[in-house]
Amino acid sequence: MNLLHHHLLAEPDAEHRLGAIVADVVRGRAREGLGARVREGIAHHEAVDRFTDAHPAVQASRARVGAPWRRYAGVVIDVYYGHCLACRWGAQAPGTFDAYVRDAYAGVTPLVPTLPEPAATFAGRLVRFDWLGAYASVEGTASLLAGMSRRLAARFGRPVAMEDAIPGLVAQHDALLGEFDRFAREAAAALAGGRGPHLLSPTPPRDHPP
């Protein structure tokens, strides 16, 4: 799941939400020095990812990603669902999208110095480059994928251009919105039902770059 939706579904305190957005970049023993609420946010993030990966609507959306980006369909759709969330904001959260993003950054910023590296750099860049606000537009969503593509290309030593999948998704936007609506409704209902970090049985971790 994308960072915006992770933040929204986390419990409404800054530490829990911080854990929900840095989970992918705090690994192993580095987590031991974090506060209890941040660690709970990390566990929440991982449970929501398991729910997301297994959801039929998400799987249907990922099947819409064509070659040559099919191998990255999980990442592409997770990020595009962030755009869908921004498009559906009035139905998903109170207040305006812009106000929510400002409040999110106000919660993250004072906690950045408490994080180990590379999470501190990641959280700082989240605010500085407005990664949450970027989901509001197609162009911003493409820029998020472009940044992730650059990191993957550096990691694997070959070109990656996940942002080039965006035009094909825009052409299917209405269908993707429908699938997102089903997923978002059922994810919120699962959390409201008190299933919390036990949304699904544990599954092997996936390779999901931030």
Image: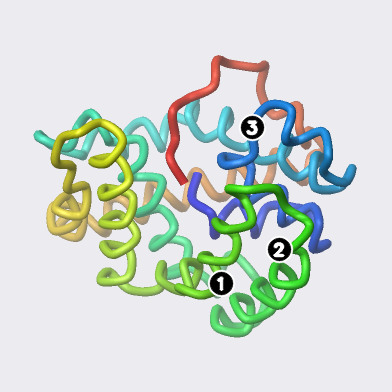
- In the displayed image of the protein, which residue is found farthest to the right? 36
| Position above or below: 171 against 55 | below
Q: Are marks 2 and 3 in contact (CB under 8 Å)?
A: no
Per the model, the C-alpha gap separating discs 2 and 1 is: 10 Å
First in sequence: mark 2 or mark 1?
2
Q: In the image, which disc is placed on residue 27?
A: 3
Question: Quick check: 205 above or below 7?
Answer: above
Q: CA distance from mark 3 to mark 1?
A: 21 Å
Q: What distance separates the C-alpha of mark 2 from that of mark 3?
A: 16 Å
Q: Amino acid at mark 2?
A: Val
Rendering coords of residue 139 (x, y %): 25, 71
Relative horizontal placement of residue 70, taking residue 74 as reference (left or right): left
Query: What amino acid type is highlighted by mark number 3?
Result: Arg
Element under disc 2: helix
Which x, y percent locates residue 11?
Answer: 79, 54
- Left of 127 or right of it: where is 197? right
Dot 2 and dot 1 residues touching (CB under 8 Å): yes
Q: Callout 3: 10 Å neighbours few (<14), some, many (20+)? A: few
User: What residue did someone put label 2 on?
Assistant: 112
On the image, the x and y values in percent for residue 206 come to 47, 25
Q: Dot 2: within a 10 Å radius of its alpha carbon, few (fewer than 14), some, or many (20 or more) residues?
A: some
Badge number at residue 127? 1
Residue positioned 63% across, 41% down in the render: 23
Q: How many marks?
A: 3
Tell me if label 3 and label 1 are in contact, CB under 8 Å.
no
Q: Amino acid at mark 1?
A: Val
Q: Nearer the viewer, residue 196 or 23?
A: 23
- Quick one: SS at disc 1? helix
